[in-house]
Amino acid sequence: MKKLLLIPALLAATLAFSEQKAYEISPMIGYNYHESSLGFKDDGYFLGGLEFQINDVDSKIKPEFSLFISESVDYTSGLSTDTIRGAVNGVYTYDEMGSFVPFAKAGLGIEDVSTETVTNKSGLFVDVGVGAKVNFTQNLALKLEAIYLGKVATHNEGILDHNIIALVGLTYAFGEIEQKSVAQPVKEEPTPVIVPAVIAAPVVIDGDDDKDGVLNSKDSCPTTPTGVTVDTKGCNVDNDNDGVLNANDICPNTPVGEAVNSDGCPQTVALDIYFENNSDSIKEASHAKLQAYADFLALHTNYSAKIVGYTDSKGSAAYNQKLSQKRADAVVAQLIAKGASATQLSALGRGEENPIADNATSEGMAKNRRIEAELTRN
């Protein structure tokens, strides 16, 4: 007799689990596994947040709003970042299996990264997930979820950055769903219910056709040649302000105000070479500058250079003329040794001529002791 009395109680419990409430709120915690190319220090990080689902809608797919936060996630560079994600999803709930209620969902969201890096920036994402709720009471259930999240990667030509998120939490259901009164239908065979497939909304991906690092929607110069340095509008720049764009400038560090040719090169270049006192022996510190100029001549064989030596006015004019010639000859010899062609080079000593500073001061004399290259485009 007691067993028979238990049957109505069990039926009532089953009906209590089955009755759906108007709203569900679910505090959640979880762990985010990410792909290593995003630059984080570890394989993943913890996150926490809240999911809010509205069941009081006339649709099999219920709207869900979610917010997740991760604080002080470390990059391998030593920086750290906070990550905030907000999403809107459609949730489809399958038939209950006892107290076990499976569901699937998909949607769109946006991720805000407080510290952006080259490989990790704020942007849109798509997510697809599955999970289940295990009912404890009419209002309380354990909620388990696994979500794939793909964020649009601006650094990677529109390919998605991949994340897998495992979540656990508690769902509190509340509010009564308003019952709509309907006329009693004539009893007939039930009409099959066709369940619509859950389809994620399409994601609009803003590309970078000329691969200059500026997205098409912001690129004012959409056909910039590959490898050219551009500004924030995607257009070629002129860093030394000589009137020749970087892409065409083979002398990119011309002093401001210097007249240049169409290649961006001035007629005269100061080589800034230093010698031992009263000698044509070149100091070791100047060899790197000589190598750079030799590389320039080897790359641009349509140019020739006259290496011109100057001295200050200390000593006799004849001695200074001879010393300036020896120094110009020494520079030519070093440029040839470092890869420049002898056919591109000539040497000339001009002694005390053409001072550029006052020989009455030590600073002025130091400026007058110089080596210049007079460039000629063949």
Image: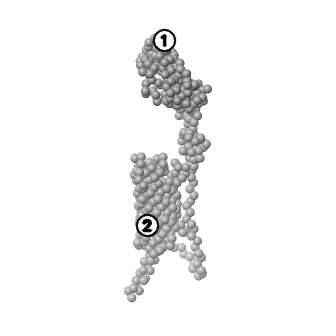
Residue 265, image quadrant: top right
Q: Residues within 10 Å of mark 1 (few under 14, many from 20)?
A: few
Indicate the amino acid at tag 1.
Ala
Q: Residue at x 47, y 51 (%)?
A: 37
Secondary structure state at the residue bearing disc 2? strand
Q: Which mark is residue 241?
A: none
Mark 2 vs mark 1, CA separation in Å = 96 Å
Q: Which residue is identified by label 1?
A: 318
Secondary structure state at the residue bearing disc 1? helix
Q: Residues within 10 Å of mark 2 (few under 14, many from 20)?
A: many
Q: Which mark is residue 143?
A: 2
Quarter of the picture holding the N terminus: bottom left
Does any portion of residue 352 appear in the rendered image? Answer: no
Q: Residue at x 56, y 59 (%)?
A: 201
Quarter of the picture holding the C terminus: top right
Q: Nearest the camera: 341 or 138?
A: 341
Mark found first going from the N terminus, 2 or 1: 2
Q: Position of residue 197 (x, y in %)?
A: 57, 66
Depicted 233 relative to depicted 319: above or below: below
Q: Position of residue 56 (x, y in %)?
A: 50, 68
Q: Residue at x 47, y 16 (%)?
A: 323
